[in-house]
Image (spheres, rainbow, N blue to C red):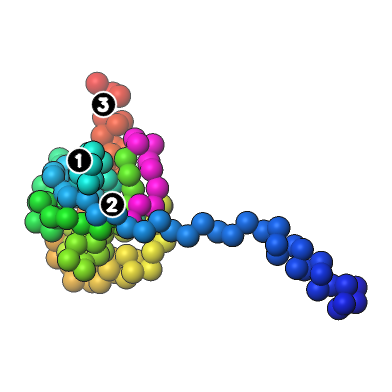
Amino acid sequence: MRPAILLPVLAAMLASCVPLAAAEPPVKWRVVSVHYGDTLTALDADKVQHKVRLAGIDAPETGQPFGTKARDGLADLVKGKTVAVQVTDRDKYSRTVARIEVEGQDVNKAMVAAELAWHYVRFDHDATLAEAEREARAARRGLWADAGPVPPWEWRATEKDRRRKR
């Protein structure tokens, strides 16, 4: 095809493409409670409650080693504070999945860096979370001080099996 003909064809093709939607701007919500090291409840400006699951991380469950510490660590960072919530998805439990920032700090990354959560690579490929986990593992503190820390997704699967056998 000659260039003179190719240009109008390319222009028509590009014009028919739908542009990717830009990410929604972060919203400001006030954190009223923390359930786990990766889940909280926040109120929007209209006082509507939103259950929020932190994107890209998975913290130990309450019955797991470091589960309570993870919950308390998240509470120390955000409870009672206004946070910037960058919504990324909604999960199968109808929770808002989001990146959270408080006082300029990336809370999701902070939980991994504080050795209180795993980077949840099954659902997220963020390089900053991966690097935070590598550094946390190398420091061998927090949940990485344990000789064989069990990821929460494996622990939950084991718990489900145990309940089924009862």
Q: Secondary structure at mark 2?
A: strand
Q: CA distance from mark 3 to mark 2?
A: 27 Å
Q: CA distance from mark 1 to mark 2?
A: 20 Å
69 w.r.t. 5: above or below: above
Mark 2, residue position: 54
Amino acid type of disc 1?
Answer: Lys
Decide: few, some or many residues near mark 1? Use Cα within 10 Å; few <14, some 14-19, many ≥20.
few
Mark 3, residue position: 163
147 w.r.t. 137: above or below: above
104 and 65: which one is in front? 104
Dividing the picture into quadrants, the one containing residue 34 is top left
Q: Is residue 11 magenta?
A: no
Amino acid type of disc 2?
Answer: Leu
Give, as a single range, the part of the protein colored magenta: 86-94
Mark 1, residue position: 47
Residue in the image at 22% along x and 46% along y: 45
Decide: few, some or many residues near mark 3? Use Cα within 10 Å; few <14, some 14-19, many ≥20.
few
Label pair 3/1, CB-CB below 8 angstroms = no
Residue in the image at 67% along x and 59% along y: 17
Q: Earlier in the sequence, mark 3 or mark 1?
A: 1
